[in-house]
């Protein structure tokens, strides 16, 4: 039921693509993506470190396809944030307790050929640090596959 609801409500992704926000974000932050051709055409998982609250937007620049994010369940406690997360097609995960429902949802999305976005090392800081080496810094898994997303330090 939850999976069906989220699948039907992925509307902000379409709106952001129509408004060409991808290009605006790339120009505004001078983002460079290299190795995107190594992302497989079918189901896959994009994994990155989480340095900033805007990292999901930067990680999504790695592919032209819609990225469905697994995000901490605490975000769904706030009605406005919950609406935004649902509208982008994200789904909650209860951290630290082996959330089998979230894992089942991830399997469903991958079985449907979707791109799953994850930040397994945890939460972000609320502000972009001047010392950050880049937004959506690739995790070890992405480095092994040669996909990097960088932008100049703020």
Image (cartoon, rainbow, N blue to C red):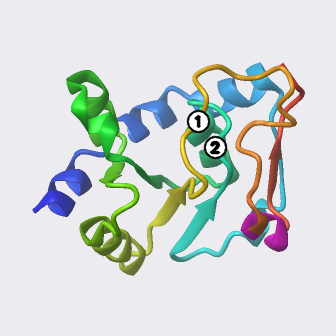
| Magenta-highlighted residues | 141-145
Where does residue 135 sit, x and y in percent of width and height?
74, 37
Taking the image as shown, residue 15 lies to the left or right of residue 129, namely left
| Residue at screen point 67% across, 54% down | 48
Residue 66 lies in the magenta stretch:
no
Query: Which residue is the extreme one toward the front?
Result: 96
Q: Nearer the viewer, residue 31 or 51?
A: 51
Label 1 Cα neighbours within 10 Å, binned few <14 / some 14-19 / many ≥20: some
Crowding around mark 2 (Cα neighbors within 10 Å: few <14, some 14 to 19, many 20+) is: many
Q: Secondary structure at mark 2?
A: loop
Res 123 → quadrant: top right
Q: Please name the predominant secondary structure of the magenta segment in the image.
A: helix
Image quarter for residue 129?
A: top right
Q: In this orientation, does residue 41 appear?
A: yes
Q: Which residue is mark 1?
A: 124
Q: Depth check: 8 or 18 in front? A: 8
Can you say whether 102 is above or below 77 in the image? below
Check contact, mark 2 vs mark 1: CB within 8 A: yes
Tell me residue 103's x, y (percent).
Answer: 34, 71
Q: Does the image show residue 87?
A: no
Q: Position of residue 111 (x, y in %)?
A: 37, 80
Q: Could you say which disc has been placed on residue 9 in the image?
A: none
Residue at 31%, 27% in the rendered image? 81
Q: Residue at x 68, y 31 (%)?
A: 23
Residue displayed at 48% across by 53% down: 66
Q: Is residue 26 left or right of residue 84?
A: right
Instruction: Decide if residue 130 is on the left or right side of residue 61.
Output: right
Q: Secondary structure at mark 1?
A: loop
Q: In the picture, which quadrant includes the N terminus? A: bottom left
Which one is earlier in the sequence, the residue at label 2 or at label 1?
Answer: 2
Question: Could you say which disc has been placed on residue 50 in the image?
Answer: 2
């Amino acid at each position: 039921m939850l999976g069906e609801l989220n699948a039907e409500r992925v509307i902000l992704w379409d709106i952001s693509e129509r408004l060409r926000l991808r290009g605006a974000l790339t120009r505004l932050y001078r983002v460079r993506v290299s190795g995107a051709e190594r992302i497989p055409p079918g189901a896959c998982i994009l994994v990155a470190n989480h340095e900033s609250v805007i990292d999901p937007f930067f990680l999504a620049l790695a592919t032209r396809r819609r990225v469905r994010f697994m995000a901490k369940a605490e975000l769904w406690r706030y009605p406005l944030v919950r609406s935004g997360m649902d509208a982008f097609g994200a789904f909650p995960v209860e951290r630290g307790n082996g959330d089998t429902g979230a894992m089942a949802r991830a399997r469903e999305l991958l079985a449907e050929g979707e791109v799953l976005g994850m930040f397994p090392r945890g939460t972000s800081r609320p502000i972009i640090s001047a010392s950050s080496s880049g937004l959506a810094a690739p995790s070890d898994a992405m480095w092994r596959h040669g996909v990097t997303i960088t932008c100049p330090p703020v």
